[in-house]
């Protein structure tokens, strides 16, 4: 499924989603903004991530430990909290599965909003909020099956 047109070349964006892999457009490199000879900007780079990760406009944290909501622990959310988002999107895989409410308590106590949704919806929502200038962080669980 194609998610959206690249619109912010300086941030991580979700380019495409399918179960088991998510294609990300990597931020445009400020240290090399033009191709050799200064003719035109270099093409945007795309990376396909398999597995679970944390994504924000400026951060990509690969190999996030929980592979399902059942494995999600409070300490897994620490890496998200460290980024100090205004909103967290928790993508729970193929289906929407709510974690225990007490698990999200640390985020709520710090006045960080949390939305739980399936991973496809989290990818779409991340792009929308990110292009609106919101500092959103997505914790994405994406099992292959």
Image (cartoon, rainbow, N blue to C red):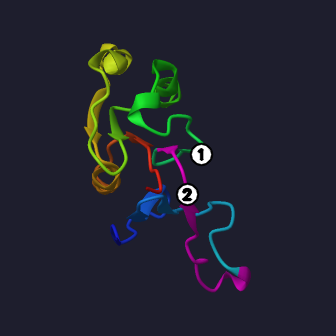
Is 91 inside the magenta-drawn segment?
no
Pointer 2 residue? 49
Q: Residue at x 48, y 64 (%)?
A: 9
Q: Does residue 132 lie above or below 85 as drawn?
A: below
**Quadrant housing the C terminus:** bottom left
Residue 84 is at least partly visible in this image: no
Q: Residue at x 38, y 67 (%)?
A: 7
Q: Are marks 2 and 1 in contact (CB under 8 Å)?
A: yes
Snapshot quadrant of residue 117: top left
**Quadrant housing the N terminus:** bottom left
Q: Does residue 107 lie above or below 37 as drawn?
A: above
Snapshot quadrant of residue 4: bottom left
Q: Does residue 73 lie above or below 30 as drawn?
A: above
Could you tell me how far apart the alpha carbons at marks 2 and 1 are, in whole angstroms?
8 Å
Q: Secondary structure at mark 1?
A: loop
Over which residues does the magenta segment extend?
36-55
Q: Position of residue 50 (x, y in %)?
A: 55, 56
Report crowding for label 2: few under 14, some 14 to 19, many 20 or more residues within 10 A (C-alpha).
Answer: some
Depth check: give the residue in front, 90 or 42.
Answer: 90
Depth check: give the residue in front, 47 or 85.
Answer: 47
Pointer 1 residue? 62
Q: Position of residue 116 (x, y in %)?
A: 27, 37
């Amino acid at each position: 499924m194609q998610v959206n047109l690249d619109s912010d070349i300086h941030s991580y964006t979700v380019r495409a989603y399918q179960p088991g892999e998510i294609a990300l457009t990597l931020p445009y490199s400020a240290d090399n903004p033009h191709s050799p000879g200064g003719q035109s900007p270099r093409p945007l780079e795309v990376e396909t991530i398999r597995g679970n990760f944390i994504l924000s406009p400026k951060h990509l944290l690969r190999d996030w430990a929980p592979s399902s909501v059942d494995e999600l622990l409070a300490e897994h959310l620490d890496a998200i909290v460290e980024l100090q988002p205004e909103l967290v999107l928790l993508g729970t895989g193929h289906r929407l599965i709510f974690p225990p409410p007490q698990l999200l308590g640390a985020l709520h106590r710090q006045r960080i909003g949390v939305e739980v949704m399936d991973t496809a919806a989290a990818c779409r929502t991340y792009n929308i909020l990110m292009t609106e200038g919101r500092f959103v962080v997505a914790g994405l669980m994406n099992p292959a099956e």
